[in-house]
Amino acid sequence: MRQVYKPDTLSRIHWRLPQIYLTRAAAAALLAIICATLATGVSARGRGRWLAPLGGGLLVLVALFGLLPELGQAMGWLPALGIAAIGYGLLALLDHNEVAVCPSCSHGEGYLTALIAAVAVHALVDGWSMVAVSIAAPGPVSVAISTAVILHKVPEGLALGALVRPSSQTRSAAIALCALAELPTVAGGALGLWAIPAGWVNYPLALAAGTFVFLGTHAVFAPRRS
């Protein structure tokens, strides 16, 4: 027998759904921050030998197999790859002019700024898309999208913590920066309650993908150069 909800019950369910969706966005951000915190706790020797290269590799994988395929479908492969190449090229140009934008640089301010900004843009769109899709297509689709976003925060958080810690004076400062980068997931979730992400958000996201590839590859190959 099919269950029939009374109007007041339906209104309570409708009122709770945004809270559930925002909770999912907060859970995604929290998971990323926890993973980042764990990564910052590894010794300096361990970070240099394996965690920083591993984090860089994870960052590249997030860009190549997470961001770019979605952007290729949303805006076309040529624009997505072209804008990502611009993001990569900008950091390469800064690095060529001896501006510190790589994990192995002696001064990490420029590197940290680029990394935190790129992750923050990615996190904002993650939360925005998660909640907007959940509202537009509640049920199994909502659960599947939310699960995918939450799970991919594990490698993202590990990569973030591994790459931020070497350029931070203290572990507490590194954790604070990681939280600053991931908390926009919740802000994006709040935006998702009001509007579906517009097409223009793909452009900064593609730039972020390019910066992910640059910063990640530098983290992988820098220890071999030293």
Image: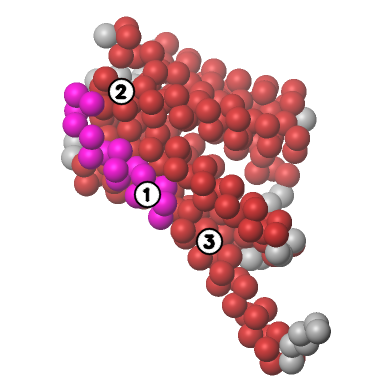
Q: Is residue 142 above or below residue 6?
A: above
The amino acid on which the numbered mark 1 sits, given as a three-letter code, is Ile
Mark 2 lies on residue: 50
User: Would you say residue 180 is visible in this rendering?
Assistant: no
Instruction: Describe the element under mark 3 as helix, strand or loop.
Output: helix
Question: Residue placed at 71% from the left, 49% from the top?
Answer: 198
Q: Which residue is drawn at 30% across and 23% down?
A: 50
Does 81 appear above or below 202?
A: above
Q: Which amino acid does label 3 sit on?
A: Arg
* Dot 1 crowding, Cα within 10 Å, few <14, some 14–19, many 20+: many
Instruction: Indicate the quadrant containing the C terminus: top left, top right, bottom left or bottom right.
Output: top left
Q: Residue 3, image x and y in percent?
A: 76, 85
Q: Residues within 10 Å of mark 3 (few under 14, many from 20)?
A: many
Tell which circle, 3 or 1, labels the residue nearer the N-terminal end.
3
The magenta region covers: 30-46
User: Looking at the image, do the residues carrying marks 2 and 3 touch, with CB atoms under 8 Å apart?
Assistant: no
Residue that badge 3 annotates: 24
The quarter of the picture where residue 159 lies is: top left
- The amino acid pointed to by label 2 is Trp
Say whether residue 43 is left or right of residue 88.
left
Q: SS for tag 2?
A: helix
Up-down: is 157 above or below 46? below
Observer able to see residue 145: yes
Q: Position of residue 142 (x, y in %)?
A: 67, 59
State which tag comes first along the sequence, 2 or 1.
1
Res. 81 mark: none
Q: Mark 1 points at which residue?
A: 33
Colouring convention used in this rendered image of the protein: secondary structure
Is tag 2's residue or tag 3's residue first in the polypeptide sequence? 3
Asked whether the beta carbons under mark 2 and mark 1 sit within 8 Å of each other, the answer is: no
Q: In front here: 42 or 204?
A: 42
Q: Where is residue 178 in the image (x, y as percent from the top left)?
A: 35, 44
